[in-house]
Amino acid sequence: MTSTIRGAAAPTSQGADRKGFDAEELDAVVARVAAQADRWATTTPAARVALLAQVIADTMDAAPAWLDAACAAKGLDPAGADGGEELFSGIGTFVRMAKALKNTIGQIETAGRPQFPGPVLESADGRLVVQVFPADTYDKILYAKTTGEVWIEPGITRAELEADQAPAYRDPQAHKGLSLILGAGNVASLGPRDVLSKLFVEGKVVVLKANPVNDYLVPHWERALGALIEAGVLAIVEGGAEAGKHLCDHPSVDEVHVTGSDKTHDVIVFGAGEEGLRRKAANEPLLTKPVSCELGSVSPVIIVPGEWSDKDLAYQAEHVATMLANNAGFNCLTPRVIITWDAWPQRSAFIAAVSDVLGTIPTRNAYYPGAAQRQASFIAAHPSALELGVVSEGSLPWTFITDVDSSTTDDVCFNVEAFCSLMAETALAADSPAAFVDAAVAFANDVVWGTLSATVIAHPTSLADAEVGPRIEAAIADLRFGGIGLNLWHAMVFAFSTTTWGAYPGHPITDIQSGSGVVGNAYMLTHTQKSVVRGPFRSSPKPAWFATARNTRKTMAKLVAFEAAPSAAKLPSLLMAAFRN
């Protein structure tokens, strides 16, 4: 690797405080929440279940105004398909996580620990693989032929796995404290989901500082999370970089969690400017308290070559195009590099199909600061980039950079997360499809920057092939990413919540890449390494989260209502809405 510039684009959303900040007021908030750490540690599982039930009910009450505000900020139609996408990702994934934790904490009350819904198996190299999805019969119906697994670090036995589960409930006094969450600015559910992880999985009381991009959501979060605020275990504050630094340095803050870029992490831990760079090089952090973080990644999608029908090509083109279009490309899990085989006879057809689909998807408001400059920097390096879709004021085209030379390993497309509506494609040389899979894994692990998430797409005939099939399974085992999808966008690792979401473990603070620690993790597993979701090569009906689905808004409204209060009586209308996609 020859590049000296790797990672996400420089942060633009945690800048100087626009309104200033009141240090005394922040200190009072921290003191008030920190004083509840002992009481929270002794709060029973039953009481926590009751709090989560109230949070779910309050979130559903807050949802209409919350959705309207988010759509207004992002230039979306709350009654349209893009409003349905925002409803699911911005509110629905939070409701699902609250429900999952409510269920597993209830199991702690009745059975002493969360009970795995699926088998615990061993990978070929002896790692334990815990199936955590589907969590119940409803999941089996709504997500047919879909599974989710948490892979455990090598050397952990089944007895150790169960004995170490839910540590904050086995020894709450050892895990109590105050966690400062520096919230994300892109997805509306991220800050609230981080609150649930810290409070209900890790046993900490929380101060959540909203990202300035998301300040407008604070009143809606306060309404949805009102039960936790009233209980004194959560406070939500606003402010920019100065407020964030004051809170990070506060002696009553025991740990910090940040969602953002590796650049943001480095400024928090080592400081800004030349002095910060010097400290990083010398491993002399300014902030020495524990810092967990979920950061960016140049997430790859590996396309396993096979003989695909026209319908296969069309479906997977919609699948991949959706991965870019979701949230206008402002996701840490947006795929940035599509990896293909240079000898695949259908490579050109696949690239053309993805381009055609992107050309039909309405472009989105580029609401996240700095997006136009980031896109321009990539186009300057690749002037032949395809710019697709009809651009309106404030939006950016879907940008697809094809045929990036895979031997130029310092290319910006492999080294910098393009936090905008842009992705690239590169082709690898290999002697056979099986050899391509091995080469793609090595490229993803060793060339592409970051370790957050990756997807592998493989036709059933490839999975069944005597040579290719075992290499695909080996790829799932060998990929060094925290969230992996097989025939299912890796974003579902985040959405399901029973799986763990975070970087592949092992990054030192001087090379943090995609971060450290996990969120989600409703079964409260320790020693986790990564999570894997698997789905059918083609789903029928078309998933409602596809950008090309026809009935997204109605389906997502019914799905979120179902997640909030599951009931067999709600299934027929939900399934009927889904079949209209």
Image (spheres, rainbow, N blue to C red):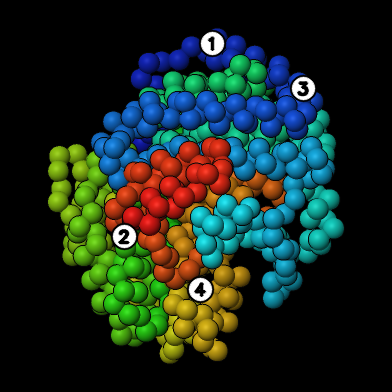
Position of the N terminus, as image quadrant, is bottom left
Q: Which amino acid does label 1 sit on?
A: Glu
Residue 332: which disc? none
Q: Mark 3 points at which residue?
A: 38
Q: Earlier in the sequence, mark 4 or mark 1?
A: 1
Q: What element carries label 4?
A: helix
Residue 509 shows up from this direction? no
x and y percentages locating residue 205 in the rendered image: 66, 26
Q: Is mark 1 on a helix, strand or loop?
A: helix
Instruction: Give the CA distance from mark 3 to mark 1.
Output: 22 Å
Q: Which amino acid does label 4 sit on?
A: Ala
Q: Earlier in the sequence, mark 2 or mark 1?
A: 1
Q: Is residue 335 left or right of residue 515?
A: left
Q: Which residue: 40% across, 44% down?
A: 556
x and y percentages locating residue 6 in the rendered image: 42, 55
Q: Which of 30 and 476 is in front in this view?
A: 476
Instruction: Give the CA distance from mark 2 to mark 3.
Output: 48 Å
Count neighbours of disc 2 (C-alpha within 10 A) and say few if under 14, some if 14 to 19, many if 20 or more.
Answer: many
Q: Which residue: 68% across, 20% down?
A: 34
Position of the C terminus, as image quadrant, is bottom left
**Circle 3 or circle 1, nearest the eye:** 3
x and y percentages locating residue 530 in the rendered image: 61, 58
Q: Which residue: 19% across, 39% down?
A: 394
Q: Which of marks 2 and 3 is nearer the N terminus?
A: 3
Instruction: Give the CA distance from mark 3 to mark 4.
Output: 48 Å
Q: Which of marks 3 and 1 is nearer the N terminus?
A: 1
